[in-house]
Amino acid sequence: MEDTSTKEKVFKRDGDLILRTAAPGDAEMISQYFITNRQYLKPWEPAREELFFSVEGWSQRLIKLHELHKMGLGYYCVLINTETNEMLGTVSFSNLSRFPFHACNVGYSLAESAQGHGYMRRGLTLAKDYMFDVQNVHRLMAGYMPRNKRSENVLNHLGFEREGYAKDYLQINGKWEDHILTALVNPNWQDTRIS
């Protein structure tokens, strides 16, 4: 039987940063990240049940996420500082659709202590490159609340373009929140089905 507890898929490296898929053995690290940043992330995320913050909850969730990774249906990634081995944030790709859409949603979070150092710009660049160059995704879609200027700046820096405004789009911290919808199109996308 294959030991998946330490298996990780390295997407990309950028100096002291590594972006990789979360592995089943990461439950304690991810749990601690969300416990440490619980109050900081609360205004920007869905209301979380207590199980979300527990090692047990993450152990269960990572088994399911590992299956999605293996099937290429979604990716939940951790952003790690290789010098300190500290988890700085998350990047996730969900609702991944192949032919004919070739698109997915991207979501992300960054630790309070990591704010203002360009880590998310670098992390999302690594993630975008992987999804465009390796997974051959045509469109990445991201939404942010209008008051979230940091998220707006990160997406603008990467070239995401505003495509719409959605009223009551997502339930964040127990309240329906409007979101600005953006997307980034892969300029080098190729139809690999055609020989």
Image (cartoon, grey):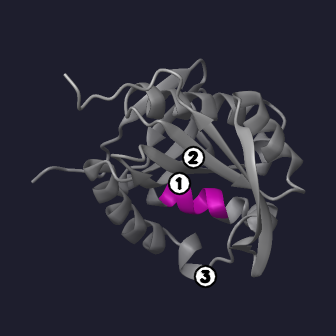
Kind of residue at badge 1: Met
- Identify which residue, 187 or 58, lies in the foreground: 187
Task: Tell me the element at label 2.
Answer: strand
Answer whether labels 1 and 2 touch (C-beta < 8 Å): no
Which residue is under mark 3?
49
Badges 2 and 3: C-beta atoms under 8 Å apart? no
Residue 84: percent from left, percent from top: 62, 33
Label placed on residue 91: 2
Q: Position of residue 34 (x, y in %)?
A: 64, 62
Q: What's under tag 2, amino acid-wise?
A: Val
- Amino acid type assigned to the residue bearing label 3 in the image: Glu
**Disc 3 packing (10 Å; few <14; some 14–19; many ≥20):** few
Q: Please give the name of the residue rendered at 79% of the width and 50% of the height, measured from the top-left corner.
A: 112
Task: Pick whichever of labels 2 and 3 is earlier in the sequence.
Answer: 3
On the image, the x and y values in percent for residue 159 come to 71, 29
Q: Quadrant of residue 193?
A: top left
Judging depth in this view, the residue of 173 and 85 nearest the camera is: 173
* Extent of the magenta region: 28-34
